[in-house]
């Protein structure tokens, strides 16, 4: 089969690539666009390590075909920090020592940012629910949840 030409936007930039019809968005991001932040943890959409935003929706990039993103807007973890400044979620994950091996980190950052864009003042239960699709084998989640709540407070201008 011939490759498919795709024109899309990734982290605000117009990009074009050729991909195989069955190639996943995750593989396109990593192998064709050199955006290696999203990780393949499971390949079945169960772990959240490959989470990206697709047209404002949180998706597992291992379950989306690269050809499906024609004309869409994709946001990866690489597009979250701006002008060498970390996003509050990234900063708070570091401050709370909520990171260890790093496999889950990109997906958690993308998912947490998506949550805080939809709900600026989530409860602990809402954060846990929203991040339930992101598996972490290292931290036990408590530091991650505290970091997201602290980022939410900072983004609202409130001391946590």
Image (cartoon, rainbow, N blue to C red):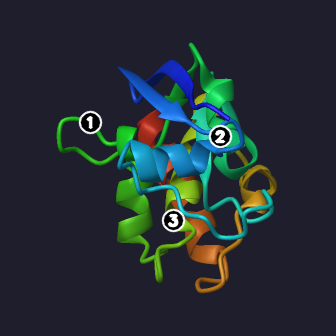
The residue carrying pointer 1 sits among few (fewer than 14), some (14 to 19) or many (20 or more) residues within 10 Å by Cα, namely few
Q: Compare marks 1 and 2 and give the one earlier in the sequence.
A: 1
- Using the image, determine if residue 4 lies above or below residue 93: above
Q: Which residue is mark 3?
A: 105
For mark 2, give the secondary structure.
helix
Q: Which mark is residue 60?
A: none
Residue in the picture at 71% in, 71% down: 135
**Which is closer to the viewer, label 2 or label 3?**
3
For mark 3, give the secondary structure.
helix
- Using the image, determine if residue 89 lies above or below residue 114: below
Quadrant of the snapshot with the N terminus: top right
Residue 108 percent location from the top left of the image: 58, 58
Residue 75 percent location from the top left of the image: 49, 34
Residue 20 percent location from the top left of the image: 61, 39
Residue 80 percent location from the top left of the image: 39, 40
Q: Which residue is mark 2?
A: 115
The residue carrying pointer 3 sits among few (fewer than 14), some (14 to 19) or many (20 or more) residues within 10 Å by Cα, namely many
Say left or right for 57 vs 17: right
Label 3 vs label 1: CA separation?
18 Å
Q: Nearer the viewer, residue 144 or 49?
A: 49
Q: Compare marks 3 and 1 and give the one earlier in the sequence.
A: 1
Q: Which residue is mark 1?
A: 82
Q: Quadrant of residue 122?
A: top right
Label 2 vs label 3: CA separation?
15 Å
Say left or right for 146 vs 134: left
Say left or right for 58 vs 125: left
| Contact flag, marks 3 and 1 (Cβ < 8 Å) | no
């Amino acid at each position: 089969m011939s490759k498919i030409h795709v024109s899309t936007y990734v982290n605000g930039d117009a990009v074009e690539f050729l991909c195989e019809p069955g190639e996943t968005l995750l593989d396109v991001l990593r192998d064709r666009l050199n955006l290696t932040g999203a990780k393949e943890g499971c390949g079945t959409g169960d772990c959240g390590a490959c989470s990206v935003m697709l047209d404002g929706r949180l998706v597992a990039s291992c379950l989306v075909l690269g050809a499906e993103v024609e004309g869409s807007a994709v946001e990866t973890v690489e597009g979250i920090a701006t002008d060498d400044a970390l996003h509050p979620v990234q900063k708070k994950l570091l401050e709370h020592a909520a990171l260890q091996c790093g496999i889950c980190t990109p997906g958690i950052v993308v998912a947490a940012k998506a949550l805080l864009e939809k709900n600026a003042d989530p409860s602990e239960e809402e954060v846990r629910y929203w991040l339930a699709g992101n598996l972490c084998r290292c931290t036990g989640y408590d530091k991650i949840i505290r970091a997201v709540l602290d980022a939410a407070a900072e983004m609202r201008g409130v001391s946590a």
